[in-house]
Amino acid sequence: MRLFNTSIIISLFFTSAVIAQQKPQSTLPRPKLVVGIVVDQMRWDFLYRYNDRYGDGGFKRLLKQGFTCENANIPYIPTFTACGHASIYTGSVPAINGIAGNDWYNQETGKRVYCTEDYLSRTVGSTSTAGEMSPRNLLSSTVGDELKLATNFKSKVLGIALKDRGGILPAGHSADAAYWFDDATGGWISSTYYMNQLPQWVQQFNNQKQVEKYIRQGWNTLYPVTTYVQSTADNNHYEGKFQGETSTSFPHTLTGGKGLGVIRYTPFANTLTVDFAKAAIRSEALGKDEATDLLAVSFSSTDYIGHQFGPNSIEVEDTYLRLDKDLEGFFNYLDTEVGKGQYVVFLSADHGAAHNPTYLKDRKMPAGYWDGDQVKKDLNSKLKDKFGAADLVLANFNYQIHFNNRLIEHNKLNKDEIIKESTNFLSKLDAVAFAIPMKELSASTLPEILKERIGSGYNPKRSGDIQIMLNPAWFQGYGTTGTTHGTWNPYDAHIPLVFMGWGIKPGSTNRPVKMSDIASTLSALLHIQEPNGNIGQPITEVLE
């Protein structure tokens, strides 16, 4: 009898040892969920410009409970949407990750390329071509990719944005899914790169037809229009009109044109994005098991609205007041669904925006518009007179001059001489502060910080041969309403950056940090390898 009991004890001991080897006794401390929030075209000062009108649960909660980096800047030019989203999640710059603009020119073929275009992929969820997209043009890995590798692909990674590039590039190559908005159907779609059909929960969400409801109700201000004292008068010549409207005043009727795509130009698309993100968290059970998940959310409407109305408009102020409420609801949802203190969230922007030049000039400040198409035409004419060949300039694009390299080679022309002649022509234009041939960047008299930003944004296979830098408050544009971005100046390059939640120490710093430091900081927090093109450094003050 005693021998029988002993054998049972020995058997139980070895069984327990085997189980212990199969299931670790403790796991590496990590948050259950990482939520990245990018607010498209959010200037840094928008954290504070409307601060008196924000509630306690949105932007103010981030600033009070989180850690804010007050001097975060984009370390490259041009400052465009695709570049920013890629840099945040790769910890890299266009020179390395290859995302040299929203579009670029292949320097070998002369073909224009959209950042996420992929004709090997097909649309999922619509009959439109809006889903022929993937991250294949991104040359480096993302935080999500590295999280997948670190957990043997147990982690889930999703990207969500109205813009395809805002959802695809942050999610990375190995993401479970990326979703973006389709103007044709008014629903969320994806591509065959990720799946062959939309999950049931996405189909159910689309079937609610929320977009049609928002369009029918129109857009009026959240509060009485007279309380928007941080903005210019409601009807003015700095703002663009909605189709079918005779003024820029509230309320806006949204049924005059653009179809379902008009929702992009309203703050309701941000609410739609939040609701879809909540549905993704719930339906995909994000943050519900031992493997950390990552959700990348980008709010695109702020960019569309900013481009149309400009940063001093009541429309932009109303959008941020509504976004503040959306963020509060989102954070409360995360507290309940994932658990307060169990997730980490960061908020940043892909770029900022300039003041409208006409608005500045009316207030006696130097500013202006630069007609890039006319400059291209004039430069081509001058080069034809000098070298005998037409259309040597392929494009004046991304504040860079792109040459027709095939034509130059075919005509056996000296490209260095063409670049020299072009540089001399451009440098004499009133709006141009500098025109710098990339081969001569290191020897130029530019401040070192600008040399660094130009070099970091230059990808030899995708960027032009001459970098153009305009005078402050000048930008390339053809109209006189709204605004844009793309330059090195603080209004475009100074971005908000706030971390909150698991593993984050509340506080702030004015130490200069870079957009490319975000991925490295997240990697340090998660104890994973940085993305393979990372050049950033962890912001150690953020971490507990």
Image (cartoon, rainbow, N blue to C red):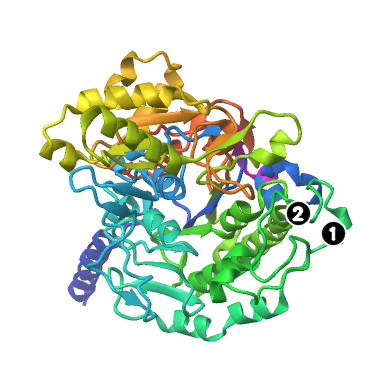
Residue drawn at the location 37% of the way across and 64% of the way down: 156
Q: Does the magenta stretch include residue 178?
A: no
Q: x, y percentage for residue 431? A: 52, 29
Could you tell me the amino acid type at mark 1? Val
Looking at the image, residue 153 lies above or below residue 430: below
Looking at the image, residue 525 lies above or below residue 283: above
Residue 356 lies in what quarter of the image?
Answer: top right
Residue drawn at the location 83% of the way across and 52% of the way down: 228
Q: x, y percentage for residue 444? A: 37, 15
Which residue has dot 1 on it?
225
Q: Quadrant location of the C terminus?
A: top right
Q: SS of the residue at dot 2? A: helix
Lateral position of residue 303 relative to residue 203, left or right: right
- Dots 1, 2 in contact, CB < 8 A: yes
* Crowd class of label 2 (few under 14; some 14 to 19; many from 20; radius 10 Å): many
Looking at the image, residue 133 lies above or below residue 94: below
Q: x, y percentage for residue 284? A: 44, 73
Could you tell me the amino acid type at mark 2? Ile
Residue drawn at the location 65% of the way across and 59% of the way down: 327
Lateral position of residue 65 relative to residue 381, left or right: right
User: Can residue 377 be seen?
Assistant: yes
Residue 45 lies in what quarter of the image?
Answer: top right
As rendered, which of 465 and 339 lies closer to the eye? 465
Report the magenta residues as a range: 63-71
Residue 77 lies in what quarter of the image?
Answer: top left
Which residue has dot 2 on it?
314
**Count of numbered circles on the image:** 2
